[in-house]
Every structure is written in structure tokens, then in C-alpha cells.
Image: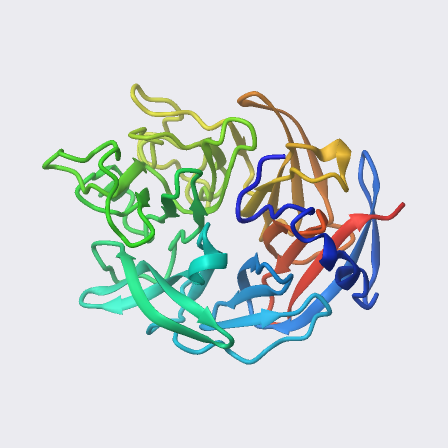
Amino acid sequence: MTLTLRHYSALTFAALCLCFGSVHAQDEILAEAQTTKLRITTVADGLVHPWGMVFLPNGDMLVTERAGTLRRVTPEGEKGPAIEGLPTIVSRGQGGLLDVTLDPDFDDNRWVYVAFSEPGDGGTSTAVARGQLDGNQLNNVQVIFSQQPKVQSDGHFGSRLVFADDGTLFITLGDRQQSYEAADAQDLGSHIGTVVRIYPDGRVPASNPFVGDDNALPEIWSYGHRNIQGADLHPTTRELWTGEHGPQGGDEINRTRAGENYGWPIITYGVHYGGATILDGKTHAEGMEQPIFYWTPSIANAGMTFYTGDKFPQWQNNLLVTGLRSRLLSRLVVEGDRVIHEERLLHDELGLRLRDIVQGPDDFLYLLTDERDGKILRMEPAN
């Protein structure tokens, strides 16, 4: 089984499984799926708009709250105090403290990475900082990336963090709700509407596709994106796949490759809120990539993960995508580079905005609900 930081090996954590089994069964909900019955249990509640989550080696979870708090949550659901040492964060609109991940060598170096909305001249931008975790303190905090330019906007920060197998870090960035007509996501002289790739200390890999191009920022990996809030590595090819918010319709899943243009806002399967076409209403254009899968109408896709565990054997290598406005979990069956089937889950049973999904060390699935009284939910087979 190939793993990323969002897919810890069950063998590595075998000694922790008993701890996860002791979660109290409050708010237990049963749900039907095509291949299995599901049990959803509340692990923790009382989180304020949680956004991102990652498991620590001891089985605890680090969870971000959008208002600017990073917390440790135990397998039994006990919430720790706010972890200190975070940089200055602007929590407004869609901005705040967003994703979190661990360094591939966390056991040795203790680096934790967070994405957040950073204030500065001109407004805000998506930024990424890292610090070394010691108890409830981040030490040696460094801002390793700051999206340029900063703009006056409270939306479309992107912010998902994924480490590649070579140790480089992908950061997804939104178009910051800039005007369609300006097509800023098509400008390689800006980080707006791009995916960037850097080393963990902020340096730029020489193999990035636009290194040496005087008209492009060297951090850029791909461009023409609207607002990517989901990302993971394909379990077989190890390529980066991303989930992108469309406007009214046109949410996308993309295989996100070096140097490629994904079209926003020149091409889209979405329309303006209210139904008017965007620019020329094109869905295809030469030199611009097509999505692997898209939703019309929009589900407001957010977090996503490829399932690689053994607790849901029928879901092996399926792509699981959370929905905000749609309040559902989409299970996509992937065959090569195609999605051949979709199953929609949990809308009727939960009816909650689902922000993120993470495979736990026990190979169960953990969901974050984006609510004022946000929860960590554990999903497992009911039988």
C-alpha cells in the first residue's frame, strides 16, 4: 500500500487501534452505501469551522479552526488548548487558518506546515508557514511562501497542502475572486489561480516548469485555476490530483501536471451565479486542459482523499470528495485517468457541510464538518 502523510500505515500505528476503538458512541448514525452499510460516530465536537486535519505519529490529530486556532485532539476526542506560535492571521470571509500537514520527516524534525490568510500591503494573500511542534508550542516559525500579489478580497484562498514523494510541497492557490475579464489566473507573472511547488524551506526546485522564464514566477507548477480546496496524490501514478470549485456549476477534478493551463476563466462548465455565461461561454480551447470529472450543478467540492486502506475493500483507490453546499460525500470510482462511477453519500443522514476527509491510522475515514459547532466524525463499516 502506497502512502502519503494523509494515509498513515495501519502497521505503523497498530498499537493505537485500541485507542480509536474506545471513542464514545455519541450521535451514532447509520447510513446506506451501495457496497456496505456505514456507521458514523462523533469523535469530537465544539470546533469552530474546522478546515484541515492531520494525524500525528502518536494518533492525536492536529486540527485547524478557521478563526486562527490550531488544536491537538486525542483519539478519545479530548481537545487541547490552542497551540501557540502561529504567525499573524486574518480571519475574515473565507480566510483564516486553513490547511495543515506534517513534514515527511516529522519524526526527526518536528516541522508542521500551515496555510493561512496573511495580511500585508495591498490586502491579503495565501501564505504557508512552518514551525517545530513541541507540546503546545510551535518554535522557529518561518513563512516559507506568500502568494503575490496581495489583493483586497476575502475569498478563494485555495490553501490545500500536499507533499510529493520527492519531498517537494504543493500549495494550491485560488483566483482571490478577481474579475473574470482580467483573467488573472492566466497571468504567469502572478500566483493568482495557480498551484505552486517549493521545497520545504521555501526554495524553488530547478525542475519547476517555468524556471528560467522571465515572464513567469518560478514557483508556479500549473495555472488557470479558480479555487482548489482539495488535493491528493494518485495512489498508483503518484501524480497530483486536485478538486476545484467552479462558480454555479463546473466544479472539477483535475490531474494537475507541470506547466499545464486548466483554463479558468477562458473555459469553464459553470456560469455566473444567476445563469449568465462567463466570458464567451467556452468549455474547450486549444492549449487548455479538460477536467477528468466535473459537476453541474456545483456540489461545492472541498477536501478529497484517495482511499488506500483495507477497512473498505470495495473502495480501494476510490476518490472521496466532500461537499459544502451540497452537504454530501461523493465517492468516485477511478479507472486509469477516468471516473467511471459516482455514488453520493451522507446527504440525507448528516445534512452537514463537509469540509475535509482524511484516512486515519486505523484505515477508517475521518470527516470535518464546517459548522460553528464543527465536528470530527469517524466513518466505518457498520457490519
* Outermost residue toward the left in this view: 214
Residue 334 percent location from the top left of the image: 61, 26
State the quadrant of the C terminus: top right
The quadrant in which residue 126 appears is bottom left
User: As drawn, is 28 to the left or to the right of 164?
Assistant: right
Residue 95 percent location from the top left of the image: 40, 64
* Outermost residue toward the front in this view: 108
Give the residue displayed 27% in from the left and 69% down from the top: 119
* Outermost residue toward the right in this view: 383
Relative to 207, say whether 82 is above or below: below
User: As drawn, is 32 to the left or to the right of 74?
Assistant: right
Give the residue displayed 20% in from the left and 55% down from the top: 149
Relative to 375, say whether 157 is above or below: above
Residue 327 percent location from the top left of the image: 65, 52
Give the residue displayed 30% in from the left and 37% down from the top: 221
Question: Closest to the observer: 55 or 240?
Answer: 55
Q: Is residue 56 visible?
A: yes
State the quadrant of the N terminus: top right
Residue 80 percent location from the top left of the image: 59, 77
Relative to 239, say whether 228 is above or below: below
State the count of labels.
0
Colouring scheme applied when the structure was drawn = rainbow
Q: Is residue 273 visible?
A: no
The quadrant in which residue 313 appears is top right
* Outermost residue toward the bottom in this view: 81
The quadrant in which residue 306 appears is top right
